[in-house]
Amino acid sequence: MALPEVIVIFGPTASGKTGASIEAARLLGGEVINADSRQIYSKIPILSAAPTAEEKGDVPHHLFEIIDPAERVSAGRWAEMALVKIEEIIARGKRPIVVGGTGLYLRTLMEGISEIPAVPEEVEELFRGRPVDELYEELQALDPNLAAKLHATDTQRITRGLVVHSHTGTPLSEWQAIPAKVPPYSFRRLAISPEREELYERIGKRWDLMVDAGMIAEVEALKDDGYTLAMPGLQGLGAEEIYDYLDGHVSWDEASRSAVQGTRHYAKRQVTWLRNTYGAEEIFASSGELVAWVKEAYSG
């Protein structure tokens, strides 16, 4: 018996995957599940470029704007939530369409969730703010196999190895060696990857639209409410530059240039992941091409 199919749409930021997922859902009687690590957070719909109510229309959307920016969402936690939504959508006789640009989320969903226990926030706090060279030296002693795979300045992954070892008493490399449970679905991997010049132009135009939509005021409200750049929901693109502008450290032109350039670098890394890791069955130059392909491929 064939496994139930889940359509997955990946693409770099500003590639048009949001619109493509909504149109594909309308064609197929589908429901959209978010796989973007920023769009899962509430209070930053403009900063995260989350789909608006008008864009969503009558298409059900899941896992958008549901977590406070102060709360961390691991790839494993997201995948668990996504699997629940996939099961519910299939039970309704609808087609799940997962869309996003966070490669780690998608890889965890499609390859299976590891058995690594969740680590309490207070354990993570024990390592936060320490010098990375000190953390790396400690990791080399506790989990040399993991340390050998990491760059000595990769603060996030080094810290992850230390907090898991501290909480469980078992090296992260040993947890990672345990085979993950692969979900009982067939994932159809589609992707959108515009030409670089077009993508970079789209990123710049989208930034301007986000500013016009009230992004500065949105971020300023968070800042006034005590949200800091150390909080997970504000660690992505744009927030730091706007905070620097609000604090008077840079001009708005400087903040904008830095944010757009950083977003373009991020998009370049996403394209690299698409080509080297994602394993797309079909790659399209635009959202329109993807939608046309879906219409033809599923017309029977």
Image (spheres, grey):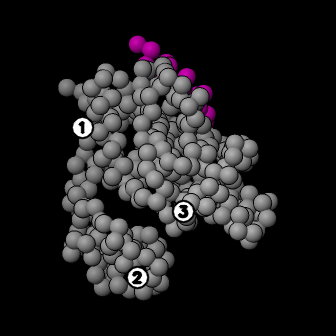
x and y percent of residue 115 in the render?
A: 22, 58
Q: Which quarter of the image is occupied by the C terminus?
A: top left
Q: Where 114 falls versus 213 (above or below)?
A: below
Q: Look at the image and tell me whether residue 201 can be seen.
A: no
What residue is shown with label 2? 135
Q: Earlier in the sequence, mark 2 or mark 1?
A: 2
Q: Can the viewer see residue 88 in this picture?
A: yes
Give how far apart the Cα atoms at labels 3 and 1 are.
39 Å
Which residue is located at x 35 percent, y 84 percent?
Answer: 138
The verdict on residue 298 being magenta is: yes
Report, in whole angstroms, how far the alpha carbon at label 2 lies from the one at label 1: 38 Å
Of labels 2 and 1, the one closer to you: 2
In the image: residue 93, left or right of residue 103: left
Type of amino acid at the residue the image marks with label 2: Leu
What residue appears at the point 40 percent right and 55 percent down from the top-left corner? 73
The image quarter in which residue 66 lies: top left
Give the amino acid at mark 3: Tyr
Of pointers 3 and 2, the one earlier in the residue sequence:
2
Give the numbered dot on residue 227: 3
- In this rendering, which labeled residue sits more in front, label 3 or label 1? 3
Q: Secondary structure at mark 1?
A: loop
All told, the count of numbered labels is 3
> Start and end of the magenta stretch?
284-300
* Mark number displayed over residue 50: none
Q: Secondary structure at mark 2?
A: helix
Q: Residues within 10 Å of mark 2 (few under 14, many from 20)?
A: many
Which of pointers 3 and 1 lies earlier in the amino acid sequence? 1
- Mark 3 vs mark 2, CA separation in Å: 26 Å
Q: Please state which of residues 2 and 103 is positioned toward the viewer in this rendering.
A: 103
Residue 54, image quadrant = top right
Residue 122 placement (x, y as % from top left): 34, 71
